Image: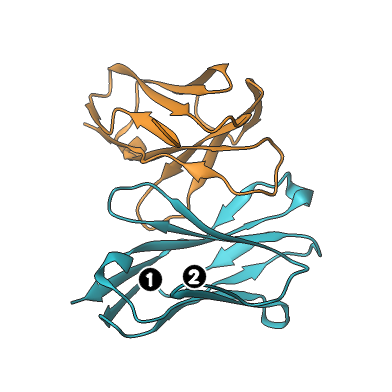
Amino acid sequence: ETGVTQTPRHLVMGMTNKKSLKCEQHLGHNAMYWYKQSAKKPLELMFVYNFKEQTENNSVPSRFSPECPNSSHLFLHLHTLQPEDSALYLCASSQDWPSSYEQYFGPGTRLTVT
Amino acid sequence: AQKVTQAQTEISVVEKEDVTLDCVYETRDTTYYLFWYKQPPSGELVFLIRRNSFDEQNEISGRYSWNFQKSTSSFNFTITASQVVDSAVYFCALSDPNTGNQFYFGTGTSLTVIP
């Protein structure tokens, strides 16, 4: 595997379900990110982890819970989501944070909340 | 406040035509970085270019070229002799050290190249 991988690629869940999104980066980076991409809106940064420590939380509702066990893996735990949470969730990584260098993105998880 | 505007929501061109995607940014800082990403239907954002605010030289990479003009706060992207594989959504982004290098993305321009 190379780059940034995400699983699952598609997820449909009910509002009472609990699920997790997984991200893995194979680039040796120290920083990892979760973004939300909704139609017609700019990408929204949700969380930033640098060396496994959370450094940013952009006012994300508590129904989204990130976890970063090591610099290569990042999870997003989901529970009691709302239909408006349906979106493409993108994981990214960069050498470190803060950094002016490019971020590398995974293919995303298309989430549908019913 | 930092902001990125991509006024062109959707563009369609016929294959082999040239096309320019516009990006206008706002920042009060003198040091900042600009990026372009491509998002094909598969979903993954693919990094294309990074440019710092002190380097106004235009850049060419194959059929891609970028025109950075600080005077108009623009960082436009041109695809020459477009191909069907260029069909994607293209995002411009701004990052500056004074806001922790957080990326500010535009809303994207959807490009369709018609064979």
**What residue is at 67 percent from the left and 76 percent from the top?**
B73
Q: What is the x, y in percent for residue B8?
A: 42, 75
Q: What is the x, y in percent for residue A29?
A: 60, 32
The single residue placed furthest to the right in the displayed view is: B30
Chain letter of the cyan region = B
Q: Is residue B106 left or right of residue B67?
A: left
* Above or below for A36 versus A74: below
Chain letter of the orange region = A
The amino acid type, in three-letter code, at marker 1 is Thr
For the N terminus of chain B, which image quadrant?
Answer: bottom right
Label 2 neighbour load within 10 Å: few <14, some 14-19, many 20+: many
The single residue placed furthest to the left in the displayed view is: B115
Q: Is residue A109 left or right of residue A44?
A: left
Q: Chain of mark 1?
A: B
Q: Nearer the viewer, residue A60 or A94?
A: A94
Location of residue A106 (image quadrant)? top left
Residue B90: give its label.
none
Q: Secondary structure at mark 1?
A: loop
**What residue is at 34 percent from the left and 21 percent from the top?**
A80
Q: Secondary structure at mark 2?
A: loop
For mark 1, what is the residue? Answer: B9
| Residue A91 in view, yes or no | yes
Q: Is residue A82 left or right of residue A57?
A: left
Residue B6: give its label.
2
CB atoms of marks 1 and 2 within 8 Å: yes
Report the Cα–Cα distance between label 1 and label 2. Answer: 7 Å
The single residue placed furthest to the bottom in the displayed view is: B17
* Above or below for B22 versus A61: below
